[in-house]
Amino acid sequence: MSSGWRPLFWFLSCLLLLFSYIVWLNCFVPLTNRLTSLIYGPSGAVESALRTPSINQILMIINVKISRVVSIVLVCVAMVTSQAIIIRHDVGPGRYEVPSRDFPAVFFLEQQGNQKVCVATVIHQRWALTAAHCVEETLLHDSIENGLLYSVNVANQTRHIDAVIIHPLYDKDSATDVDLALLRFREASPRPLPMPIQLEETELGETVSILGWGYFGLGTTGRQYNDGNLRRATNQITQAGRRLRIMFDDPRGTDKLALPLEGMPGLGDSGGPALISSEVGLVLAGITVGEIEGPEFSEETQGKYGSVAVYERVSQHVDWIESVIGSSAPFDS
């Protein structure tokens, strides 16, 4: 082998090893654990009579794990999954980082290697709210379709999602699309305390806190890398119609509209909350949908100064949420 090709050879070899490890970690280990659970029971202890998993159960598990590998491949190649936080270029990054225990009702839906993809918020002891397209962009959809429970980590405890209710107007090709989904936990839990939802249509001009794991970046350059850290930024609602909108103001501008910890959602933050302070504490006012694709929009520079993010307006869909949950808001908060 010529010396000119050696660097490329070693790079490709390392990439192959890394990919093999990810596949093993995200497919074969969970598959083995799942089959063990089917045979020996959820506790892992041998029961008086060994369970014999059916062929359909095994095939469903294998199908979901293959889907996980496909998902990982797409992430590794394209890095363009769902809509972490882009921050001001003139503020220390550490000021945006927050421990997840500060927001126990907020959790990510899937972890792909170091990346945490999509976000949901607990709004009831048995229900969480997210973006509908997050159901499609994670293994949540395949798991539920195949009759399997979907496990998530909520406030350091494992919860199991057993049903997904998509908003009836969800249609990515429609101008009146409603990108919302309710996730039902198999069992109710009083912890964490659910996040109250915004009931009044008084969001315009309010300051919101936005949260997310995933891609970090600066307003001058847009998204840069994903370190899996939870960050919180603030912004101001500039439009409150069918949906909510926020804009990333450049602190170098003469209007000086940028907030001290202003920021924007970015790649990996879909389904994340926009929280407004109220008399009862923080309330869930919006669910991250994405960024408006204007003339200067680019996936590689997503979240730059001047960009506009869109949120589903929770107050517009209280009736639907109540009808699905079967009780009136405020819920168990």
Image (spheres, grey):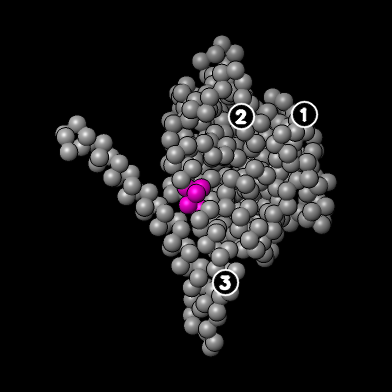
Compare marks 2 and 1 and give the one earlier in the sequence.
Answer: 1
Residue at position x 62%, y 46% in the image: 136
Mark 2 Cα within 10 Å, few/some/many (few <14, many 20+)? many
Which of the two marks, 2 or 1, is nearer to us in this view? Answer: 2
**Residue located beneath label 2 in the image:** 291
Magenta span of residues: 68-72
204 drawn magenta: no
Q: Nearer the viewer, residue 223 or 56?
A: 56
Query: Is residue 310 toward the left or the right of residue 19 in the image?
Result: right
Location of mark 1 (residue): 241
Q: Is the N terminus in the top left, top right, bottom left or bottom right quadrant?
A: top left
CA gap, disc 1 and disc 3: 51 Å
- Residue 236 appears in view: no
Q: Is residue 261 above or below residue 269?
A: above
- Which of 11 and 88 lies nearest the eye of the viewer? 11
Q: Residue at x 77, y 33 (%)?
A: 176
